[in-house]
Image: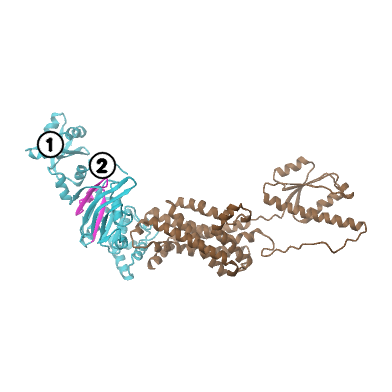
């Protein structure tokens, strides 16, 4: 026990004397949070639109104003001809273009269906489909408005019953802002970066400067060495979580609906995996540089891509979806979003937490054995 | 009881045999020198004895504990200092001592005693708060030695402890080694510095993983240079060297600057004046001999005598 405490004291002293490490742990997460908080924005509020009105009639102008009034679109240009409109799309100035044919009003008045062409810049599929949704909703509500007007003009009373109206109510994140959804999961990201990177670096550094060999000829036992190395970074990890939460709550105003102490407890469980992975990286790296690259490409990148943090798991191919079952960050992302946005408790999250715990134990035991072997 | 007993110790790395069937004993309180060129197997042997690496075959005991079966007990009874400075540069002198004291399980009062001893012995009492990275190489090495013997081990292993220090620091360091030995600590030291080997009670010469000579420095000299050694000055040492290599009175010759060290053959011991005979031989071949006299051989002469083909640097 004494040896472990001496180890922790040593680790903290070294940590406090290394301004670079200090910056990595305490400043980087905050910067990351602020950047991601502002940049990770997939909301589409302002669809840049070009309009080519070949009809120039009252009806077509009425139709266009329906778009303008919807609040989703801003018209950046009334094009004179088709090639002008093409240019705006090509240059990326406009996301969509609406082309109204010259027989728009004629068809409308004679009770025929009028076709309107809408062109999307599909290079960002996500954006284009969101914009398409907006177009559909504006067009259909305009259509039904015309329909009702025409009935009323002809003197037929529209029966009030029989129509179905769906009222949408969004739970947990009512404004559907990306930020509220993304920020909580940054807790997991920061924990991975800090613990995997720092643990592996701290061990490999000792190997590089020869102190690890010096320790090997002392009676210190491998488990003492491992605990002495991992415990300080557990504490540092918790400090980073506190920082991230503070910025999230006080800067971005996202309230934590669930229990904060439960959130810390889950972070500890998650750290079993990340510390274990850090230890693993240290056993396969000879230099600090190698450890950096290995943790970035072997651990951090796959975690981010396969955890559902960046891309929804549901839209991945089946085979990749199976791989995500062994990604600890996947479970932690579910847990942290659950606690922060939905106020979930252990009663709701016990399954994810158990899997996370099991994964952590397996990774940590495997890495410890590898580390022990590498010392012999 | 011997401090260290080594029987047929062998270590192979793949096809390469680093240490080849080595056996020796080291007595308690001895300063035991392990000599050899780079890559001769010195460090590998020391690392096996400290329990860092496992031997391929053979056995050894350190302070009575088997290195294979009781490595933990071995580790509790030894101190180790490697050629690299392996303390924490970003910790102060005192913090390093505290850390290793904790690792060795020293009680608080004993740690205080030993800390004062280390600070005094290394001359760092005034600079206890200095980061150890800021110390000069000589001070670093004394601090490293201090940390290695903090727990007063029965045996201390020093792997090329004086690499890269100036002669005065080296001399001070050897004074410390002799003090340790006088207080009963066995000192096992590797070096390729032959001046240093003169300070050892006993020496083993290692070449390509094999023991080529063993004994006290004096024994080694009389064993390998039985018939005396001449110091020969000439303005053309290279030609002289080539001529003498094949001469019947000469056992071996080596170039030292503008002079030769010539060890004499058995045949020379029967000659009345071998030195004059050699001078006459060289001058008859047109080489001017500026001076020739008998000298006491150094360990370097012994080393060159025993090692036919010096191993190149690894």
The percent position of residue A346, horizontal first and vertical second, equals 58, 69
* Relative horizontal placement of residue B156, taking residue A366 as reference (left or right): left
Viewer-side residue, A182 vs A250: A182
The percent position of residue B108, horizontal first and vertical second, equals 33, 70
Viewer-side residue, B214 vs B284: B214
User: What's the mark number on residue B249?
Assistant: 1
> What residue sits 48% from the left and 56% below the top?
A197
Chain for colour brown: A
**The quarter of the displayed image where residue A166 is located:** bottom right
Label 2, residues with CA under 10 Å away: few <14, some 14-19, many ≥20 = some
Please name the residue that numbered disc 2 is placed on: B310
> Mark 1 or mark 2: which comes first in sequence?
1
Q: What stretch is highlighted in magenta?
A: B185-209
* Relative horizontal placement of residue B190, taking residue B247 as reference (left or right): right
Report if residue B187 lies within the magenta region.
yes
Q: How far, Cα to Cα, is label 1 from label 2? A: 24 Å
Chain for colour cyan: B
């Amino acid at each position: 026990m004494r040896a472990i405490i001496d180890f922790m004291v040593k680790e903290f002293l070294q940590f406090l004397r290394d301004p670079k490490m200090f910056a990595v742990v305490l400043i980087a997460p905050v910067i990351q949070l602020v950047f991601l908080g502002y940049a990770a924005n997939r909301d589409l509020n302002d669809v840049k639109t070009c309009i080519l009105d070949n009809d120039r009639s009252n009806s077509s102008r009425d139709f266009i104003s329906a778009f303008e009034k919807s609040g989703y679109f801003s018209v950046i240009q009334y094009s004179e001809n088709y090639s002008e409109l093409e240019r705006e799309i090509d240059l990326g100035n406009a996301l969509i273009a609406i082309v109204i044919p010259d027989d728009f009003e004629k068809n409308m008045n004679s009770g025929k269906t009028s076709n309107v062409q809408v062109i999307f810049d599909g290079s960002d599929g996500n954006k284009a489909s969101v914009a398409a949704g907006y177009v559909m909703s504006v067009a259909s509500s305009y259509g039904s408005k015309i329909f009702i007007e025409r009935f009323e003009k002809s003197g037929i009373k529209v029966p009030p019953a029989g129509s179905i109206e769906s009222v949408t109510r969004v739970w947990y994140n009512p404004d559907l802002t990306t930020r509220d959804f993304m920020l909580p999961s940054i807790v997991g990201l920061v924990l991975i970066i800090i613990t995997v990177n720092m643990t592996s670096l701290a061990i490999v550094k000792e190997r590089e400067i020869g102190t690890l060999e010096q320790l090997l000829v002392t009676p210190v036992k491998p488990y003492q060495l491992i605990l002495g190395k991992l415990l300080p970074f557990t504490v540092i990890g918790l400090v980073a979580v506190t920082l991230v939460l503070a910025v999230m709550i006080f800067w971005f105003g996202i309230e934590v609906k669930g229990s904060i102490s439960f959130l810390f407890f889950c972070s500890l469980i998650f750290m079993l995996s990340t510390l274990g992975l850090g230890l693993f990286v240290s056993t396969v790296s000879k230099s600090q540089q190698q450890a950096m690259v290995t943790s970035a490409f072997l651990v951090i990148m796959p975690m981010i891509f396969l955890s559902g943090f960046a891309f929804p798991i549901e839209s991945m191919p089946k085979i990749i979806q199976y791989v995500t079952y062994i990604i600890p960050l996947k479970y932690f992302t579910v847990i942290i979003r659950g606690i922060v946005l939905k106020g979930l408790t252990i009663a709701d999250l016990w399954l994810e937490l158990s899997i996370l715990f099991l994964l952590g134990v397996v990774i940590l035991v495997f890495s410890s054995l590898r580390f022990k072997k590498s010392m012999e | 009881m011997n401090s260290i007993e080594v029987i047929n110790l062998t270590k192979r790395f793949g096809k390469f045999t680093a240490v080849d069937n080595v056996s020796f004993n080291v007595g308690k309180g001895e300063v035991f020198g392990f000599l050899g060129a780079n890559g001769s197997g010195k460090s590998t042997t020391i690392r096996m004895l400290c329990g860092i690496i496992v031997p391929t075959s053979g056995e050894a005991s350190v302070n009575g504990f088997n290195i294979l079966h009781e490595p933990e007990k071995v580790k509790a009874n030894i101190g180790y200092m490697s050629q690299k400075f392996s303390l924490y540069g970003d910790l102060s002198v005192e913090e390093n001592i505290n850390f290793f004291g904790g690792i060795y399980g020293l009680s608080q009062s004993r740690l205080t005693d030993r800390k004062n001893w280390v600070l005094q012995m290394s001359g760092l009492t005034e600079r206890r708060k200095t980061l150890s990275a800021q110390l000069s190489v000589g001070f670093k090495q004394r601090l490293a030695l201090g940390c290695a013997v903090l727990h007063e081990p029965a045996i201390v292993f020093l792997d090329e402890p004086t690499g890269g220090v100036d002669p005065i620091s080296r001399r001070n360091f050897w004074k410390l080694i002799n003090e340790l030995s006088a207080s009963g600590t066995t000192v096992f030291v590797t070096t390729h510095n032959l001046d240093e080997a003169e300070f050892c009670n006993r020496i083993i010469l290692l070449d390509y993983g094999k023991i080529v000579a063993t004994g006290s420095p004096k024994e080694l000299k009389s064993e390998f240079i039985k018939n005396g050694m001449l110091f020969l000055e000439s303005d053309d040492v290279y030609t002289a060297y080539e001529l003498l290599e094949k001469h019947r009175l000469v056992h071996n010759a080596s170039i030292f600057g503008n002079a030769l060290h010539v060890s004499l053959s058995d045949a020379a011991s029967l000659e009345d004046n071998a030195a004059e005979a050699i001078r006459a031989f060289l001058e008859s071949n047109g080489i001017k001999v500026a001076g020739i006299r008998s000298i006491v051989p150094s360990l370097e002469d012994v080393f060159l005598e025993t090692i036919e083909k010096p191993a190149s640097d690894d």
